[in-house]
Amino acid sequence: MYDWLIGDWEADVYDYQADGSKKNNTGEWHFSWVLEGRAIQDVWIVPKVSARSAATPSEDNRYGSTLRIYDPNIDAWRIFWFNPVAQSRSELIGRKVGNDIVHQGIDDDGSLIRWNFEDIKPNSFLWRGESSRDGGKTWQLGSEFVAHRIAEVRR
């Protein structure tokens, strides 16, 4: 389900604030097979390495990693994301829904989270991060990554 991601990507990153404003940034995302091909791991960096400095505010500093492991007992992927800079983590379940990949979980504050890969093409995709504080009745868009492949690695 995720093998098409293997390689290196750049992204235009849009973070939506509670007041309706939007922050723009750039990022990079690197995906590879790990654990003898049993999992896919990525490193997610916003802002891009070339744009980082000691002055990057911690709330804008995302340098984390995701591990995706298929679980045949639930016929889905277990997703574990960690950002040691912000001391945040998330656990989600990922499944293919139509042409999209939908990840669902519960955030530390109890709100539902949904991370989707949408508009998937060989060299581009849209990633959306959303949250819901009312049990999924309404969703608030938090981030969008418009990603473009810069390098592909064949397995």
Image (cartoon, helix red, strand yellow):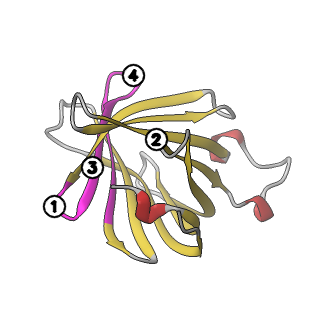
Report the front residue among 23 and 79.
79
Mark 4 → mark 1, Cα distance in angstroms:
30 Å
Q: Label 2: which residue?
A: 38
The disc, 4 or 2, on the residue closer to the chain's N-terminal end is: 2
Tell whether label 2 touches label 4 (CB within 8 Å).
no
Quadrant holding the N terminus: bottom left
- Region in magenta: 97-118
Which of pointers 3 and 2 indicates the residue nearer the eye? 2
Residue 16, position in %: x, y?
A: 44, 54
Q: Is residue 22 above or below residue 85?
A: below
x 86%, y 47%: residue: 54
**SS for callout 4:** loop
Q: Which amino acid, mark 1?
A: Gly
Answer few, some or many: residues within 10 Å of disc 1's Cα (few below 14, many 20 plus, some between 14 and 19): few
Q: Which amino acid, mark 3?
A: Val
x 28%, y 54%: residue: 101
Q: Label 4: which residue?
A: 109
Q: Label 1: which residue?
A: 98
Q: Quadrant of residue 63?
A: top right
Q: Which amino acid, mark 2?
A: Arg
**SS for callout 2:** loop
Mark 1 → mark 2, Cα distance in angstroms:
24 Å
The disc, 4 or 3, on the residue closer to the chain's N-terminal end is: 3
Q: Is residue 62 above or below residue 88?
A: below
Q: Quadrant of residue 61?
A: top right
**SS for callout 1:** loop
Residue 73, position in %: x, y?
A: 23, 28
Mark 4 → mark 2, Cα distance in angstroms:
31 Å
